[in-house]
Amino acid sequence: MLGMVFAIHEINQNKKLLPNITLGFRIHDSCYAESRATWGTLSLLSGTQIPVPGYVCKSHPLLAGIIGELMSTLSISVARILGIYNFPQISHGSVISSLSDKIQFPSFLRTVPNYLFPDSGVAKLLWHLGWTWVGILTIDNEMGEFGGQYLKMEILRLGTCVDFMERVHVQHSKERLLKVVELVKISTVNVIIINSDEIHARAFLEALYLQDITGKVLLFTAAFTVTPGLLPKEARIIMNNTLGLIPFSGTMPGFKNFLRGLNPSTSKDDIFMKPFWEKVFACKWQENKSSVAATPHEINTESAFCTGIEMVDETIIDYFELNDLSYTYHAYLAVYAYASALSNIISCSSGNNKTCSPGDRARINDIQPWQVLHTVKKVHLYSNTGEEIYFDENGDAVIMYEIMNIQILPDDAFHLVKVGRMEPKAPVGKEISINVSAILWNEKFTEVPRSVCSENCLSGQRKIFREGQPVCCFDCTTCSAGEITNSTDSPDCWKCPEDQWPNERHDACIPKVIEFLTYEEPLGLTLAIIALFMTLLNVSVLGIFVKHRDTPIVKANNRELSYLLLLVLMLCFLCSLIFIGYPTATTCLFRQTIFGIVFSISVSLVLAKTIIVVIAFKATKPDSKLRKWMGSSLPKLVICFCSFVQIIICAAWLLSYPPFPEHNTKYTNGKIIIECNEHSAAFFYCMLGYLGMLAVVCFIVAFLARNLPDTFNEAKYITFTMLVFVCVWLSFIPAYLSTQGKYMVAVEIFAILTSSAGLLSCIFFQKCYIILFQPQKNTKRQLIGTFQ
């Protein structure tokens, strides 16, 4: 109310806005029943007469408008009646949202926003400070129920969770209050939102102190009028270093001087002066004037009586409410809003304002309340810092809220330090601005307190929500193979692109390692060297056979087939090199088919040699019908036929399902295997099956002819050769299927080299040994004499 008194005093003294009108206080209406309750809640403009109790009805209204009340519950009851007669009412502290309903309250305005904005701002402030786990205490009445639910809804909408929401009331029993305090004590939240006025929250704050619960951060909503000086010591200790919201307040020049000049003797008609005097000086008024006057240091002296000559010094001013000028300032704004409206009406009536509408014009002595209401809605005020203050279509002031840090010093002096603001006109996402470094937290915290149910999941981890608990309560687990997350508290991980793989922390995708069998790596280089060595060895054997082509041991083993077999074996060794290196379309197309055809020819040659041995022995009998198969025609027929079947299989494979290079990302983690996709496993295994069938047939024929009584019989060597060949390729199939990537290729190369080396060594090494180291055995007599 001091703000109203000061504003009216300034307007009456300066006469800048209303040169011909004097403003004052009056509890009066055109027709109303006066009571003691309404006496302290309404401030009426125009008139200085003492109000007359009872009913007063006049034909013309005496009032231009009403200021008040601070409490929403009182404003509602008055606003319903005043709205019938279009009497404007401007509140400086009622924040309940229902007062914005212009159907129910058409003439109600306020110099503060409704609580929906600050409550949504509280939710944004929590999110801004990283507080995702909070508790709510709200007043136990209809306003508290609706406001608490709206606040909770806003908090949940932004992803913050509420551990509990309890109600407090000044009339609650001690047992019920202790239950609430015990709940706060066992809760893991570090931040508690107080959505109650100071009257109902006072007992709760005292109970927190008695239970030694001092490690919580309290956040007072706009419903709490932050005036620690009027609360007991216990409540002030709990409030120390906490945060609160108050409507924006500017400075009122000359206000302190105005307070110093107040005196009951000079303001006899001011009904608020004596209560103010009693509160400041802790004294009581009495009829007996002989008592000694109180001083500021006699606050706790019960026998002090007020005299009216006490001095309002700086200590008293600071102690009372000047640290929180918010609601005082908004009462001051309400008076100036009326003064500006009346000034505009007078200006329009005199014809000095060309922008006026007919409804804005009225005679000074006949200003109607509806005209004041019409004009005051359009008033724009400016603070000394340039902040524009105006009413929106619902009659709510569009102003910012300030975030205060309550700091109470050991000598009980307190300061409300402005540390931030909530701006309704700011862009989305930037409504909150706060200087965290300016906030003084209680001794439990050395930095911004944390209030979370679960610690943040790091990058590379995802949340696993706990069943039956709020979404803020969760466990963290590392992302699965092939997945990452590069943000904290991620509910999901996502897969990397096919050509990338997670790093060790699973917080970033990195390029996969390209894998194929190369000549640069030890495995590929070793296999290439072995292949080249075996090729050179094969060439050496061929050179030995060519050089000693006229010796009996070379002639006796079908010299032409031996030459051809050595040439084909050389191709067998060399074809393994096609499998090493970067797979291309050409190498993928031909490597398996070349291998299959070359090996089929080699096995066909061995089969032809074996058949010739059998025919040569059987044809020596006089009545043998096999004499006609002697010569070179049968081997050629066997070789061509057996090879042609494999050529047909490979040609059909290439024409219908040609192999192609492929970047395989399925078989291994963190690698891209560049391999040849055979496209048709059926043709691949058909090719191998046919090759195996030739080897088995050759083995059977050689096995049956192994004991023929002929010095030149090499069937026993071929038998062992085919046994090695079949064993190698039977072992190859499970080994090939159980490996992947470059190791799969290496297994096939090893099988090619091993089977080719088996053919070379088993058939030719023994003969080369005789040629080079035992030439005495390389004679026709020696060979024939062996079986004589």
Image: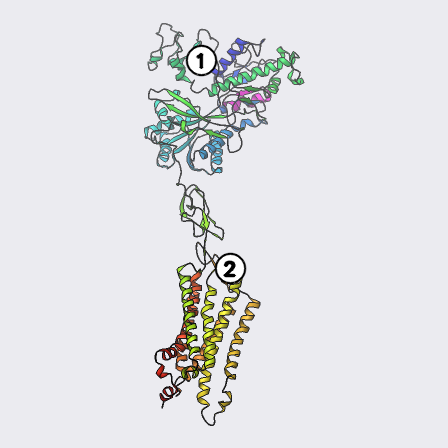
> Mark 2 belongs to which amino acid?
Glu
Q: Picture coordinates of residue 728 (x, y %)? A: 41, 72
Q: Is residue 610 visible?
A: yes
Residue nearer the viewer, 714 or 231: 714
Circle 1 residue? 256
Q: As drawn, which residue projects farthest toward the top? A: 290
Instruction: Give the alpha-carbon distance from disc 2 to disc 1, as whole Å.
Output: 85 Å
Start-end of magenta stretch: 74-94
Residue nearer the viewer, 670 or 598: 598
Of tags 2 and 1, the one toward the viewer is 2
Vertical placement of residue 173 versus 651, above or below: above
Q: Picture coordinates of residue 287 (x, y %)? A: 40, 7
Q: Picture coordinates of residue 673 (x, y %)? A: 46, 58
| Mark positioned earlier in the residue sequence (2 or 1) | 1
Circle 2 residue? 662
In the visual, does 788 lie left or right of 47? left
> What is the quadrant of the C terminus in the image?
bottom left
